[in-house]
Image (tube, rainbow, N blue to C red):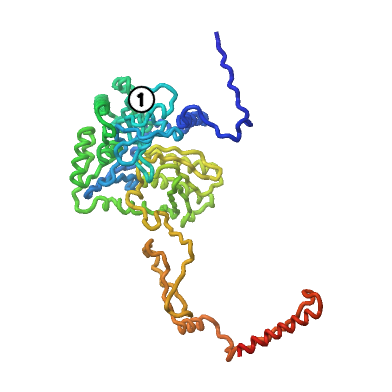
């Protein structure tokens, strides 16, 4: 017996065309389904699985070095590729990251219209939990997925921080907890198993066989790139350690009072070494006693085969100065970036997106025509843009305005170069299609504050806008005489400091005699007039069209003559 489903009635386009439509269930969950559906229809651009030869060639192509410097309460880590700084991490005592921490939070209030809940995690400002990040199965809720029915005010909830507070926004939370390890990420109460697509196909097949033996049925894992070459025992120890951490978190959650911290991520130094340091790095240079003890102890425990690549910096010369990291950091804080050939990039950060403008600048090409010159400049800019995104840790929507190219093959070449360079970026990103205006759109996950925010503070005078608005016309007063000429003071030059506290122009006053002399020198010589020249007196002729008769016109003329005579007598 075959049951034929009746087709759904299609709504006419004219019905409710002027009314706001609603969605059954959660809007955020529906948006997530829609993105997946559109990706399947359009053919989502996924990173292809590379072969063993390509994997080895990519590793040998770039020499990677990690430099760690500890100065007082600040620890900085720089990652160099062929002596060029591509990533930078900084940890200050006054600004600690919460990403990865697991809390037993307390629901403050639920906003059904925003499909979000505000959670108190004990950090002063409430964090936000959206409906798309709620683990309804873990909460024991199996009805319609509405956040207001699953969460109530005052209810304790197990959450993990996925994004630090940025600006006026609070921390971002999820109730789908994941615990990162050295070789894999443990996802309790998950069922999916994933392997990094940066690993070659032969290594992926080997890891799949091992995971079937060691992963519990009630959990899922995501294998990192660092798992390349790891033995079954090493992977098993990683899974058992993370599984034990999850059991401890559950015990604390049952006995703790919200809000409280259940699991804290390790120090930034350990976190970066855990996530980044692998076989791709030639060496790790460590400057500082505490940093050396921390890194050496961690690597010798979890990856003893990489201990030989650790190097302790004992020279009196600063390590960052030797590797020219400070110099490259200073350039990365500028708005304008110069390309090696003479072109330039202008990077602006707005509330909505990051905008990158590509200019030819001083680059005039080396023969060929304009199309070839522009394409070479765009290829060089694509590589530098990816480096700047990684170094400045820029996230959100990124719009790139490349120089217009006529041939479609050249546009595809630039886009391919951009995607190849993004293959080295660990942060999650996605490149969209080129718009009709020739703009390249992409997104990059924003986790914490960027490089500029780490080394700067907002100006208290202009509030970070860069300008001070004057609605009233400025007035100037001075005691140099009414006829004095005001001359602006000399400029401070190209490198003059800009002080927001002094936005008024300063003048120096010149006497009337000096002004006359300066005027005489500037103006050409003219005929000298000994006295004021008398102008001829205008003759008043009444217009007869304005009067009803000739007599009224004559009377008006006589009255005008009398007024002129009286004014002449008063003047004498």
User: Quarter holding the N terminus?
Assistant: top right
Q: Secondary structure at mark 1?
A: loop
408 w.r.t. 160: above or below: below
State left or right for residue 518 relative to residue 267.
right
Front residue of this view, candidates 460 and 451: 460
Front residue of this view, candidates 184 and 51: 184
State left or right for residue 206 relative to residue 479.
left
Residue 451: x %, y % from top left = 35, 48
Q: Total label count?
A: 1
Front residue of this view, candidates 270 and 218: 218
User: Quarter holding the C terminus?
Assistant: bottom right
Residue 20: x %, y % from top left = 55, 34
Front residue of this view, candidates 533 and 572: 572
Quadrant of the rendered image containing residue 218:
top left
Quadrant of the rendered image containing residue 115:
top left
Residue at 40% across, 54% down: 464
Residue at the top extreme, as displayed: 1
92 w.r.t. 529: above or below: above
Residue 97: x %, y % from top left = 30, 41
131 w.r.t. 461: above or below: above
Residue wearing tag 1: 139
Question: Can the viewer see residue 199?
Answer: no
Quadrant of the rendered image containing residue 252:
top left
Residue 443: x %, y % from top left = 44, 40
Question: Can the viewer see residue 434?
Answer: yes
The crowd level at tag 1 (other Cα within 10 Å; few <14, some 14-19, many 20+) is few
């Amino acid at each position: 017996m075959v049951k034929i489903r009746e087709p759904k009635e299609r709504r006419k386009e004219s019905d409710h065309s002027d009314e706001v439509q609603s969605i059954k269930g959660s809007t955020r969950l529906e948006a997530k389904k829609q993105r997946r559906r559109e990706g399947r229809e359009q053919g989502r651009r996924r990173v292809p699985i590379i072969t063993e030869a390509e994997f080895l060639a990519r590793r040998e192509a770039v020499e990677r070095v990690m430099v760690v410097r500890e100065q007082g309460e600040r620890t900085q880590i720089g990652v160099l590729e062929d002596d060029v700084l591509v990533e930078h991490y900084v940890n200050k005592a006054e600004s600690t990251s919460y990403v990865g921490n697991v809390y037993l939070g307390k629901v403050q209030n639920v906003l059904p219209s925003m499909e979000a809940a505000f959670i108190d995690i004990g950090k002063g400002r409430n964090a936000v939990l959206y409906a798309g990040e709620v683990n309804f199965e873990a909460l024991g809720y199996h009805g319609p997925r509405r956040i207001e029915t699953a969460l109530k005010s005052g209810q304790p909830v197990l959450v993990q921080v996925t994004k630090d507070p940025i600006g006026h926004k609070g921390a971002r939370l999820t109730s789908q907890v994941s615990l990162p390890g050295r070789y894999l990420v443990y996802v309790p109460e998950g069922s999916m198993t994933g392997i990094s697509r940066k690993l070659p196909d032969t290594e992926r097949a080997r890891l799949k066989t091992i995971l079937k033996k060691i992963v519990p049925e009630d959990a899922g894992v995501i294998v990192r790139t660092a798992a390349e070459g790891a033995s079954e025992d090493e992977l098993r120890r990683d899974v058992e350690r993370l599984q034990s951490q999850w059991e401890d978190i559950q015990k604390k959650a049952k006995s703790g009072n919200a809000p409280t911290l259940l699991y804290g991520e390790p120090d930034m130094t350990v976190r970066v070494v855990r996530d980044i340091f692998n076989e791709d790095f030639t060496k790790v240079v460590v400057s500082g006693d505490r940093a050396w003890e921390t890194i050496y102890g961690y690597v010798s425990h979890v990856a003893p085969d990489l201990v030989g690549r650790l190097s302790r910096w004992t020279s009196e010369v600063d390590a960052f100065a030797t590797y020219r990291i400070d110099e490259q950091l200073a350039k990365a804080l500028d708005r304008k970036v110069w390309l090696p050939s003479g072109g330039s990039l202008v990077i602006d950060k707005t509330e909505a997106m990051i905008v990158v403008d590509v200019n030819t600048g001083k680059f005039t090409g080396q023969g060929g025509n304009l199309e070839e010159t522009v394409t070479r400049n765009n290829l060089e800019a694509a590589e530098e843009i990816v480096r700047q995104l990684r170094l400045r840790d820029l996230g959100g929507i990124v719009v790139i305005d490349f120089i217009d190219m006529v041939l479609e093959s050249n546009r595809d070449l630039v886009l391919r170069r951009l995607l190849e360079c993004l293959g080295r970026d660990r942060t999650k990103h996605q490149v969209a299609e080129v718009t009709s205006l020739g703009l390249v759109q992409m997104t990059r996950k924003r986790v914490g504050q960027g490089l500029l925010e780490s080394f700067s503070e907002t100006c208290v005078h202009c509030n970070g806008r860069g300008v001070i608005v004057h609605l009233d016309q400025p007035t100037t007063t001075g005691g140099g005489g009414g006829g004095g000429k005001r001359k602006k003071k000399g400029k401070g030059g190209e490198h003059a400091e800009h002080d927001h506290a002094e936005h008024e122009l300063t003048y120096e006053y010149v006497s009337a005699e000096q002004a006359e002399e300066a005027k005489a020198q500037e103006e050409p010589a003219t005929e000298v007039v000994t006295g004021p020249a008398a102008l001829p007196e205008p003759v008043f002729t009444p217009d007869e069209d304005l009067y009803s008769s000739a007599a009224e016109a004559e009377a008006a003329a006589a009255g005008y003559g009398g007024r002129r005579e009286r004014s002449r007598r008063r003047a004498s």
